[in-house]
Amino acid sequence: MTPRPASAIRACSAEALLDTIDRQIIVATQAGLPRVARPYHAIAAQLGVAAEEVMRRLRRMLETGVIRRIGAVPNHYVLGYQANGMSVWDVPDERVRELGEKIGALDSVSHCYHRPRHLPAWPYNLFAMVHGRDRDEVEAKVLTIADLLGTADRGHTVLYSTRILKKTGLRLGG
Amino acid sequence: MNELDRRLLNDFQHGFPLSPTPYADMAHTLGATEAEVLAILARFKAEGTISRVGAVVRPNTVGVSTLAAITVPPAELERVAALVSGYTEVNHNYEREHQLNLWFVVTAPDTARLSQVLDEIACRSGYEVLPLPLLEDYHIDLGFDLRI
C-alpha cells in the first residue's frame, strides 16, 4: 500500500482514539454552541464534566483534525450562492490524488472528494462542489477546473440541485 | 448586512475562541460588545444566514457515512424522496438535474447499520441505490470566504 502524502486528509483514522466524553462533546457542539456568556461551561454542566476539560478536549480534537474548525457555519444559499453545482470528473485513477489536491486548493471549491465509479452508469471518480451566485459563474469556475486538468479530463458534467428535500446537521443515528 | 455583520461572519468561520468567555473575546477583537455579538448571531440564526456556531467534524470520524444516488422516474420522485427523507440516518437529500436525480447522505453509528439503511431504501423504493462513499478528501476546510 502506498503511503498517503501528508497533505491528503485521512478519512478514516482517529476514531478509536475518541472516547465517550469526546463523542458527547462533538454531539453537543455540532448542534451549535449555546449563545450564553460561558457556552463551554453550559456544555460542561450538561455533560457533568469541568469546563476546562471540555475546552482541553476540543483543542486536542482540533489539533488531531477530528474537528476541522469551530466557528460560524454559513448557509451558502442565504448568502446568495444559490447555484451549488456538483462537478464530477472522470480522471485516470493513478492521478486522482495529485489532481484532487490541486482542485481542492481552489478558492471556488468547497468540497473535493475521490469517490468510486459505478460503470457503465457512473464513470466519474472525482467530485468538486462549486458554488456561484448563478449558473454562469459556476460554469466559468468549472472551465477553470477543466483547464487545470487538461487531458486528464476524460469527461465531466455538472449536477445542479433543483430542490433541497432535507438538510440537517450531523446525526449519529441510533 | 453592515460592516460588523460582515466581519463577524467572515472572520469567525474558524478560530472561534476556546476560552471561558468566547463571545466577549470575539467582541473585543471586533471592537463591539458581547451583547452586540450575541444579538448578531441570534439574528443570523433566525434569518438562516448561518446554520450554527459550532464544530465542523471530519466525515467518518463519529459514525460512518456515505453519499448515495438513485435514478427515480419523475412520477415516483415524491414517494421515493419522502421515503428517503423519513430515515433519521439521512441528513441531506437533494433533487439534482441528471438521470441520477435523487442524491442523499446516510450517516450511521457503524457500517452494519449503514448497509442496512441503503438496502432498505433499495428494497422499499424498488430502485437501485448507488453507494458513493468518500475514498479520500482533498479539501482543507477553512470556511467560506465572503470576499471572493
Image: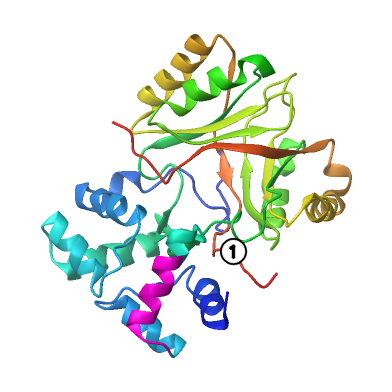
Count of marks placed on residues: 1
Which span of residues is magenta-colored?
B32-43
Dot 1 corresponds to which residue?
B144
> Can I make out residue B77 in this image?
yes
Q: Position of residue A32 (x, y in %)?
A: 35, 58
Amino acid type, label 1? Phe
Image height of A17 relative to B8, above or below: above
Is A170 on the left or on the right of A56, as rendered? right
Q: Position of residue A10 (x, y in %)?
A: 49, 48
Image height of A36 relative to B110, above or below: below
**Residue drawn at (32%, 67%) of the image:** A59
Q: Quadrant of the C terminus of chain A?
A: top left
Q: Residues within 10 Å of mark 1 (few under 14, many from 20)?
A: many
Which of the pair A117/B42 is nearer the observer?
Answer: B42
**Kind of element beneath mark 1:** loop
**Residue drawn at (61%, 53%) of the image:** A77
